[in-house]
Image (spheres, grey):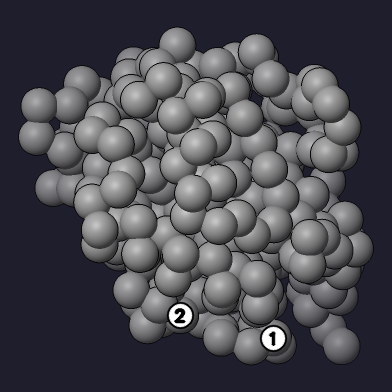
Amino acid sequence: MNSSRRILALVVAGAVATLAACGGESGPIADPDDNNSAAGSTAAPVVTDPSEAPLATISPDLPEELEGSVGPVLVVGDELPAFADVVPDPAIGVEAPVIAGKDFEGRTVRIDAIAGGPTMVVFLAHWCPHCNDEIPVINELRDSGAFPDGLNIVGVSTAVNAGRPNFPPGRWLEQMDWSYPVIMDGVDMEREIFIAGNALGVTGFPFTVLIDADGVVVDRWSGEREPEEILGAISAGLGI
């Protein structure tokens, strides 16, 4: 195994060990010059295009097969504590960091609830069977019009591994009919983490974070939920 593959293996192995709990129409604000920007939206004021940020570049050590599946990710603000399924969750009431990244078409996507309104962030791993079960549940709520008006939904494709099922993740999400904006998570080779996932305290898949219009975390959970549970959490946490 060459050096770049060894580095990636360490990153993936560490993330998978940490994230072993895989068992367990509105989008975010886009770049103001981007054709993906939502009509009438205000651009997030605190971040720029992540590909232009020196701390958000894609490492040259990444294997060639991950090109187009891993992106630059910029985090502005403090990372949330890792989720531990304890009550109360220490992240509740804490301001979430703003996250900017790229989608699979190279467009800038931002998670910034202060600029864009209440937001539900869903972290998804292409190889996780529970993510494959949860996406149809989200699609069911989408297709029935059950999600409240004003809710932004964004996916984050994370824990990418070319040797596991459903790779590449961009094609997988298309086949799964995921229609919301999505960020390709980035890898910090030095810290051996997936950047966006680490910033919001991800410890399992799927992983969901609810952020209110003040940018404050109101709920997080790891694993699958039934449609009524998802809607109940949105109503209770976001009041919409």
Q: Is residue 57 above or below residue 170?
A: above
- Disc 2: which residue: 172
Residue 138 horizontal/vertical position (percent): 42, 59
| Quadrant (top left/top right/bottom left/bottom right) for the N terminus | bottom right
Tally of numbered tags: 2
Q: Is residue 154 above or below residue 3?
A: above
Q: Is residue 120 above or below residue 42?
A: below
Q: Residue at x 30, y 48 (%)?
A: 146
* 2 and 1 marks in contact (CB < 8 Å): no
Can see residue 123? Answer: yes
Which class describes the residues within 10 Å of circle 2: few (<14), some (14-19), or many (20+)?
Answer: some
Can see residue 49? Answer: no
**In this view, which residue lies farthest toward the left?**
39
| Type of the residue with mark 1 | Arg
Q: Residue at x 37, y 82 (%)?
A: 175
Residue 6 horizontal/vertical position (percent): 86, 75
| Type of the residue with mark 2 | Trp
Left or right: 231, with 18 as reference point:
left
Residue 159 horizontal/vertical position (percent): 68, 64
**Label at residue 164:** 1
